[in-house]
Image (tube, rainbow, N blue to C red):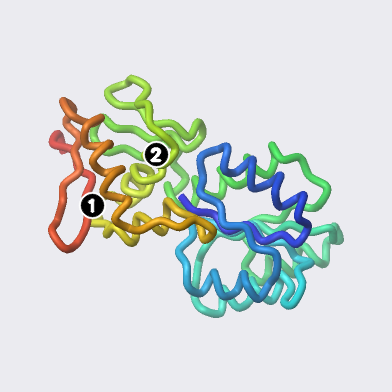
Amino acid sequence: MRILLVEDHPQLAESVAQVLKGAGWTVDVLHDGVAADLALASEEYALAVLDVGLPRMDGFEVLARLRGRGKTLPVLMLTARGEVKDRVHGLNLGADDYLAKPFELTELEARVKALLRRSVLGGEQQQCCGALVYDLGTRRFSLAGEIFSLTSREQAVLGAMIARPGRVMSKEQLASQVFGLDEEASPDAIEIYIHRLRKKLEGSAVRIVTFRGLGYLLESLDA
């Protein structure tokens, strides 16, 4: 899953990004509201972590414009403004959660996990495709009850597919979830990860099916 982090303090942005990346998410980092508004209008994200005090366009305006486009993307607001009226204003604009600075990075990670669990997994802790299980809490896959070891890229590809059961995903859609804005990667690179995942899934009842010209589908033969 891909997260947008918008924070104008470089050191804090770097610290938060490292924690989120360490938990296995792909993270795009931006530092001003106008860039954030453009990214939210053109890119696909699972969640946004949005600071209120941004240059060029504040976080409240970015959030209002996002909701004005009809997007239900979960948004966690960060702010040095701890007053109740500011929290109420953000929540009324459509924020899903609010975290006042200074905060513990472990709390931020826990809140991100909770928002993703509610939005992506419908409140469930796990996503399943037959014997393949993804646990959002541990950020790990298991296959037939055993830990399923994957590289970070392989996990990102498989995570995007298992989160969309029954849906064929194109290389472009998968690439948008795996690679950040600052990474140069062709959608054709997805073929490499699909090949590796197929090798690792060999012998199980879970497979990745290719639909020529359309993309890939994760399915269980036991379904």
Q: Which mark is residue 155?
A: 2
Q: In this rendering, would 165 be left or right of 21?
A: left
Instruction: Measure the alpha-carbon separation of dots 1 and 2.
Output: 18 Å
Report helix, strand or loop for mark 2.
helix
Callouts 1 and 2 close, C-beta under 8 Å: no
What residue is at 49 percent from the left and 60 percent from the top?
Answer: 45
- The image quadrant where one finds the C terminus is top left
Q: Is residue 23 above or below residue 36?
A: above
Q: Which residue is mark 1?
A: 166
Left or right? Give the position of 222 relative to 21. left
The residue under label 1 is which amino acid type?
Gly
Q: Residues within 10 Å of mark 1 (few under 14, many from 20)?
A: few
The amino acid pointed to by label 2 is Gln
Instruction: Residue at 36% x, 46% y: name it.
Output: 157
Q: Residue at x 59, y 47 (%)?
A: 112
| Foreground label between 1 and 2 | 2
- Comparing 186 with 33, the one in front is 186
197 or 108, nearer to the observer: 197
Which of disc 2 and disc 1 is earlier in sequence? 2
